[in-house]
Structures are given as C-alpha cells and as structure tokens.
Image (tube, rainbow, N blue to C red):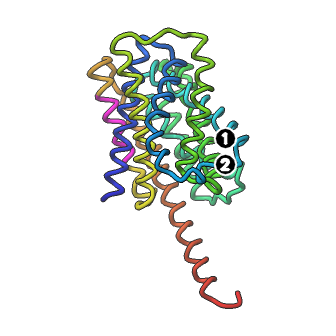
C-alpha cells in the first residue's frame, strides 16, 4: 500500500508537471521551459543532497554522465515540445511507449537475453503506438514523430541510468544529472531568451518542483514495491491530463488514443511482470548456490 501510494503521488506529480509545461508553452519557448524546469528542479534537490555523506557524492563516471545528460536533454526537449503542441492526452500516451524501447535498448546495449514472450509484448506495444500515431491518416502529424523520438531517447537514457547505478547511488545520479542539465539546457534557451511574465513564473516553477517530486516519489516507490504491480498505476496520469486538456484547452480525446494507450499499458505491464519474475528466479538461484558448499 505504501509503494502504491508513492507511485500514485509520482504519477499525479508528473501529470501536474505536464499541465504546467502546457500552460507555460502559451508564452514561452520549449527551450526556456526546459531550462527553468531543470533550474528549479536542482534547487528542489539540493536540500536532499545536503543531508548526504559528501563521500557518497563523488563519482568517476563523469564522461558517462555527460553522454547520458546530452541524450536526456534531447529527450526532454522533444517531450516538452510534444506536450506544448500536441493534445495532452496524445503526447502522454505516446510517452508510455518508453518501456518498450527500454527492452530493445537493453538487448542492444547491455546484451540482455530477451525471450520470445517479451519480444511479443514489444510488438504489441508498437501496435499501440501505431494506433495512436495513425501514419498515413488525416490525423497524422510530424509532431507525433517528435513525441515518439522523445520516448526512444528516454529508453536509451533509462539503460544509461541502469549502468550508472551499478556504481553510484540514486541521489548521486540525480544530483549530477541536474548539474549537467542546467548548463546544457541554458545554451539553447539563450537563443530564444525572454523573461517569463506574470503567472508564467508559476508554471515554470511548478514544472520544476512537480517534476522533481515525481522523480523522488517514483524512486522511493520502487524500493518496497514491485515494478510489475506498480506500472498500471501510471495509467492514472492519462485521465488527469485528458481532463485538463478538455477543461482548459478544449481538447477532445479520440477513441483510438484511449485504445492505443491501453494496449501500450498492457504491454508495459507484461514486460515489467516478466522482468520481475526473471529477477526473482535469478535471486533464488543465487541464494541456492550460496547455500550449497563447494559450488
């Protein structure tokens, strides 16, 4: 129950962040929104980092952090543009496809053995994406490809985080990510710079605070809970943003978006379930081997 509550808090936080980004996009360029989201996110993280042992914040993986953060900025800019220019529900639904690309990236970059059933789940997830994007139809737009690019890059970033976490603690990864993200996102923001006016400040501050809160809640939810059980909770973000899009921006969510999102969610849930099963088997095997002398 605790893990489920934390996952729900994470999902709602990310949903509010998406709404804040959409509102900020009415007066600010995507580059600036990304910079302020990272800046206020860093300020929100600092109190947590200050309570850590300074020795645990050292890292010998700075070149890898640079690459991870550069790809992460690309994913962020594409994702923020999609939130600002596509219907909210469509942009969020496409972002659900990230775990599908994580599975592919794990096989390519980490050499993980992906069995047939997970490849079938990946294929089903792609079908869900195609249902939402609808290539060749009148509802198709180049903007959906930008949203899909964000999901692909986010999948690559997830694999890089997995590699970093083999050496560094979670808070160390978060800190260095923001330390790289702030100057990286400032450079493109300077090309289109204009100071936020009035209530736009509230939206960019909210994007930073709620985005960071979502990351923190998500990290802590995964400690006591299983990914396979928590993944379906993330679907609660879609009704939230769909309602906001309908109330504030006059957006109607098409039936195909709901169907595609449900298919992607089902594929994600199965992938997470299989990964959890395989992890438990590996752990049980390791315990058994450790308990058997001479093997």
Query: What residue does disc 1 label?
Result: 65
Residue at far left of view:
247
Quarter the N terminus occupies: bottom left
Is residue 234 left or right of 166 when viewed as pictured?
left
Q: CA distance from mark 1 to mark 2?
A: 10 Å
Residue 104 is left or right of residue 12, and the answer is: right
The image shows residue 154 at horizontal and vertical percentages of 58, 38
Q: What is the quadrant of the C terminus in the image?
A: bottom right
Predominant secondary structure, magenta span:
helix
Decide: marks 1, 2 in contact (CB < 8 A)?
yes
The residue range painted magenta reads 233-243
Up-down: is 232 above or below 93? below
Query: Mark 1 packing: few (<14 Cα in 10 Å), some, or many (20+)?
Result: many
Residue 54 magenta-highlighted: no
Q: Secondary structure at mark 1?
A: helix
Give the secondary structure at mark 2.
loop
In the image, what residue occupies the spot 55% across and 77% down?
284
Residue visible at 41% across and 18% down? 24
* Residue topped by disc 2: 59
Q: Residues within 10 Å of mark 2 (few under 14, many from 20)?
A: some
């Amino acid at each position: 129950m605790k893990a489920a509550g934390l996952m729900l808090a994470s999902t709602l936080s990310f949903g509010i962040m998406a709404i804040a980004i959409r509102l900020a996009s009415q007066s600010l360029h995507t580059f600036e929104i990304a910079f302020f989201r990272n800046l206020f996110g860093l300020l929100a993280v600092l109190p947590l980092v200050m309570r850590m042992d300074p020795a645990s914040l050292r890292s010998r993986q700075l070149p890898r952090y640079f690459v991870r953060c550069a790809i992460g900025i690309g994913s962020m800019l594409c994702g923020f543009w999609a939130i600002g220019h596509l219907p909210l529900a469509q942009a969020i639904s496409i972002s659900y496809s990230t775990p599908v690309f994580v599975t592919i990236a794990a096989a390519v970059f980490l050499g993980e053995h992906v069995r047939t059933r997970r490849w079938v789940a990946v294929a089903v997830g792609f079908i869900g994406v195609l249902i939402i994007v609808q290539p060749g139809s009148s509802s198709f737009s180049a903007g959906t490809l930008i949203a899909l690019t964000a999901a692909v890059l986010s999948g690559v970033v997830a694999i890089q985080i997995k590699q970093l976490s083999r050496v560094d603690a979670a808070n160390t990864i978060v800190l260095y990510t923001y330390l790289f993200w702030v100057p990286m996102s400032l450079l493109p923001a300077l090309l289109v710079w204009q100071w936020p006016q009035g209530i736009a400040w509230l939206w960019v501050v909210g994007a930073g605070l709620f985005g960071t809160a979502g990351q923190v809640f998500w990290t802590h939810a995964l400690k006591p809970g299983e990914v396979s059980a928590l993944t379906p909770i993330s679907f609660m973000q879609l009704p939230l943003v769909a309602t906001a899009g309908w109330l504030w921006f006059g957006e109607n969510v098409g039936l195909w978006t709901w169907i595609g999102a449900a298919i992607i969610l089902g594929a994600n849930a199965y992938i997470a379930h299989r990964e959890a099963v395989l992890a438990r088997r590996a752990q049980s095997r390791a315990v058994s081997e450790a308990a058997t002398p001479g093997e």
